[in-house]
Amino acid sequence: MREKKNNDTPFVPGMLTHMTDIKILICYLLAAVGEPLDKEQMIEMIFENDIAEYFDLREAVMQLVETGNLQEDAEGCLTLTDSGREVAEQLESALPFTAREKVVKEGLKIVTLSKRRKANKAEIEKNKSGIFVNCELKDEDASAFSFRLLVADEMQAKMIQEKFLENPALVYKQFMNALLDK
């Protein structure tokens, strides 16, 4: 049940519409997760959860970087500066609780997925024999589980890659259960 905001922009009740609120939310999110976040993933996540408009988010990030509240590295990851941390601590109560709760929950998912992607591998390989997905679950520095699948097409390869990286331990558990007849 969307109402119209000015200029026929879709609006969801509870959505943040003031630039100041959006900036506070971004600072709050980065303070709460305590780790750098990929700018594009963060913007998409906030937008997809109907918390703020896409272009407002891009503008807010740009302004926060310009004012020194955020730093952006060469890979597009955002880090909160000391002044941004102060903004988050002093003004978080100005934000609706539901927006804070939702954005932190989703932000932590981004951090977890990012760590899994760095710790584990799922690579797509194309050669004359077809398209393969090579997956590896690591336990510290050692490979605990790996497999290679021949797949039908690139779309299927990307789906397998994403699912494996979402929860490699679950794939391992299900594989073991299948082999051990559980």
Image: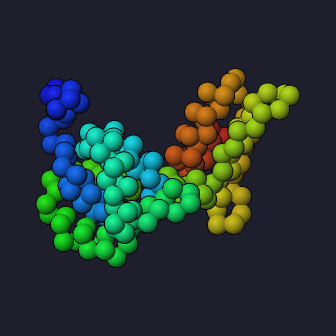
User: Which corner quadrant holds the N terminus?
Assistant: top left
Left or right: where 146 falls relative to 100? right
Please state the horizontal and vertical placement of residue 139, each as a whole percent of the image. Answer: 64, 62
In which quadrant of the rendered view does residue 86 lie? Answer: bottom left
Q: Residue furthest bottom?
A: 82
Left or right: where 28 falls relative to 45? left
Residue 117 seen in the figure = yes
In depth, the one of 111 and 142 nearer the eye is: 111
Residue at position x 50%, y 52% from top?
113
Q: Residue furthest top?
A: 152
In which quadrant of the rendered view does residue 180 lie? Answer: top right
Residue at position x 70%, y 39% from top?
124
In depth, the one of 137 and 129 nearer the eye is: 129
In depth, the one of 34 and 64 nearer the eye is: 64
Please state the horizontal and vertical placement of residue 132, each as a whole percent of the image. Answer: 74, 34
Please state the horizontal and vertical placement of residue 57, each as a whole percent of the image. Answer: 32, 48
User: Which corner quadrant holds the C terminus?
Assistant: top right
